[in-house]
Image (cartoon, rainbow, N blue to C red):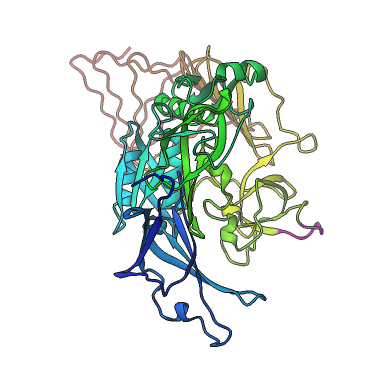
Amino acid sequence: MATAISGDFIKYAIKVGSKTLDASYPIQSIIVDKKINKIPYAKIVLHDGSIQSQAFSIANDKTFSIGATVSIRAGYNDGLEQLFEGVVAKLAIQSRSTGLSTLTVTCRDASYKTTLTPKTMHFVKSKDSDLFKKILGSYSGLSHKIEATTIVHENISQHEISDWDFLNIRAEANGQVVVVNDGTIAVKKPKATGKGAFTYTYGVDFIEFEAEIDAKDPWSAATALSWNSSKQNKVVEKASDPGEQSMGDLSYKKLTAAAQPGNVAISHGGLLDPLEIKTLATSLLNRSRIAKIKGSLTVPGNAALRHDGLITIAKGASHFEGNAYVSGIQHIISNGNWQTLLTLGLDAQRYMHKYHDIGALPAAGMMPPMHGLQLGIVKQITQDPQKHNRILVHLPLVQDKPKEGIWCRLASFYATQGSGAFFIPELEDEVVVGFVNDDIRFPIILGALHSSKHAPPKTVDPKNLFKSFISREKLELNFHDDKEGPEIIIKTPKGGLIQISDKKKSIDIVDQNGNKVVLSNDGINLTSSKDINLSARASITIKSGKDVIVSGTQNVNFKSMNINAQASMKAILSGNASTEVKSGMATIIKGTTVLIN
């Protein structure tokens, strides 16, 4: 029989392993506690220990061995129903000055194994419901009931966090709660509306009752914001309105009208599936509605009550009547009495706000963490004692003496074996330093900073048309991003220049001596302040689609072992003053007709 009738006799039974405890185990009290998003536990307090015999006989008989299975049942008259099933997880003895001593046996649901070890796992192309099944399926002795989720994650990681915490965080993001009952883990959406499984009436079966309503808890609406990097715009998703989710005649609309909380915005800067961010906003809005009324109700012991269930409260104050969501149950058996304490409503506080020990410690707990970034001054760029190509940086807010420093690795936009970008900051440059895992012993220079003291080499153009790299000795690589004609200009401080211009449709090369090469629509123009020498180990070929003109203000000299000049039509050799044909040996003049003078 689940519920009590006046005059019913309370019975309970505790089984440890295969042994059912008898009267030789004097039970002082039993507490069974089950709440959503928490591991159920039971506490059995026994009278144990004798000053006369100087022994804790029950603790010594090994019945309650760590890891032993435990089941607790309770009921009325001859009917017993299960309240708890789990394992012995903790033993504690206590002896008081009054001479009373006890053994307290703490039992936990078998699911407590999911809380023990921080883990790191990575999942690819997986739904949350699929990874829940994978995680929970790795534990023997546990079963699970998982409601399907819809979002498929390209990548999702569990990093140095227990399976239990990861499960709760991801369940919350999907608008779900985690409900554990006797070795079965259910992940599901809370059902806070409907008909109560049991009705409790003020003045009839209330033992204790307290409830409160607070206008600050329910939200009027919620909006989710994210960033679409592919479209470069803000994504706004409005939460689906879950409607009324709590008991009483004072609706959330009346409460929010009084408090005027406005629209609550939840933001995430990543490129999220719009459905994912909308689901989160809807989840949090729903939690705030269920949290409108919170309280507790103590009733006669009832083994059929369930957390994540509904009861009906009758004949109370009108604000606190109706169907109430039960987020927790606690059975208390002591001194021949059995009462069940019900936790009503849902805590709106998010899971990660409740617990501050979720996830890995900064610096693995080995050092006080160095949060955020630090500014530093470069003091030395060579002679790294560990030969890791590090740079010595003074951190003014960390190190008192200006000559003190810390050796930092240098981040680069391209670094690989034997090649990469090689840009080393100058001495006394101001740099930004970050720390691997927030550990000050492992700093990395992330970049350098200009300031009013260390001014940039150029002023900012309002149109931002110019990009430059300018070295300490004024070697320049300039980019002119004018869409009418972009240019690349390479300059040296003494006049060396290479200019590649789409605007002029030319490439200009100029040296410090006045020599110049121009490649343009007019062709190629070579200009020299002195000589132009062409030299080749093999042949030099000059070819033109039209004329080839060689001219000089004084002499044009051809000198070679052999000179062969050949015209396919006519060959003319003339001199305005004189023409001389001369040979050290034979001179041969041939033609079909040879005319002299």
Residue 176 in percent (x, y) is at 41, 36
The picture quadrant where one finds residue 172 is top left
Q: Is residue 448 magenta?
A: no
Answer with left or right where residue 503 lies relative to residue 16: right
Q: Please tell me whether residue 295 is drawn above or below residue 331 in the rendered image.
A: above
Q: Residue furthest front?
A: 7
| Residue that protrudes farthest toward the bottom in the picture | 53
Q: Is residue 538 visible?
A: yes
Q: Residue 402 lies in magenta, yes or no? A: yes
**Which residue is at a point 66% across and 75% down the rendered structure image?**
98
Q: Which residues are magenta?
A: 399-405
Q: Main secondary structure of the magenta part?
A: loop
The residue at 61%/20% (across/down) is 255
User: Above or below — where is 517 with respect to 10?
Assistant: above
- Name the residue located 44 percent from the left edge and 60 percent from the top edge: 116
The residue sitting at 47% across, 46% down in the picture is 300
Q: Is residue 268 visible?
A: no
The one of 512 and 139 positioned closer to us in this rendering? 139
On screen, residue 233 above or below 476: above
